[in-house]
Amino acid sequence: MKPTYCSSNPTHGSAERDGKIAFARFLNPPDENEAMPTIVMMNKVLWQDDLVFKRALLEMSNGNTTDSDVDFLLSRFVQNLPEQDHAQFNDALQLVSTWAIVQQIKH
C-alpha cells in the first residue's frame, strides 16, 4: 500500500483505494453533525523507545504494513490490556473517526 500522501489513483476494489476513501471520509465526513473541529497544541516531543512499535509505525507510514505489524498494533489496544492497566490511560488522548464515538467516550 502506498503512503496517504501519494497522489496516484489506486486500483478499483483494492485495499489501497478503500483506505484512501476511509481517510477522506475521516477528514471530510459526509455528515457534518458527526464531526467537530478541534485544535490540539502538542508542546512536548515524545520519543518511542519500543523498537518493535517504532518499526511498525515506520512501516505503516511507508505503506509497507505486514500482517505481523497489524497483529502487533491490534494487541496494543487499551481494551486488550489486563483490567488493572486500564486506569493508566484515563487521561490519554484518544483519536476517533466520528463524533458519535466521542459521545460514547464522554459518557
Image: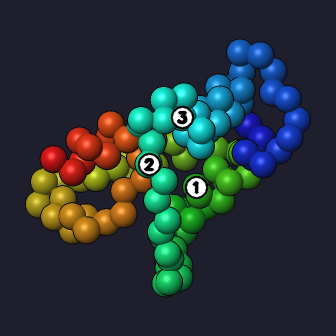
**Mark found first going from the N terminus, 3 or 2:** 3
Query: Can you see residue 68?
Result: no
Q: Amino acid at mark 1?
A: Ala
Quarter residue 26 falls in: top right
The residue at which mark 2 appears reads as 36
Residue at left offset 54%, top offset 69%? 51
Residue ranking furthest to the left: 84
The residue at which mark 1 appears reads as 56
- CA separation in Å, label 3 and label 2: 10 Å
Provide the secondary structure element on which disc 1 rests.
helix
Q: Give residue 29's mark.
A: 3
Residue at left offset 51%, top offset 42%? 70
Q: Is residue 57 left or right of residue 37?
A: right
Image quadrant in which the N terminus is located: top right
Quarter residue 64 falls in: top right
Residue at left offset 85%, top offset 29%? 9
Provide the secondary structure element on which disc 3 rests.
loop
Residue 6: percent from left, percent from top: 83, 44
Residue 31: percent from left, percent from top: 48, 29
Q: Residues within 10 Å of mark 1 (few under 14, many from 20)?
A: some
- CA separation in Å, label 2 and label 1: 30 Å
**Of labels 1 and 3, the one closer to you:** 3
**Mark found first going from the N terminus, 1 or 3:** 3
Residue ranking furthest to the front: 33
Q: Mark 2 touching mark 1, by CB under 8 A?
A: no
- CA separation in Å, label 1 and label 3: 28 Å
Q: Mark 1 touching mark 3, by CB under 8 A?
A: no
Provide the secondary structure element on which disc 2 rests.
loop
Front-most of residues 99 and 60: 99
Query: Can you see residue 14?
Result: yes
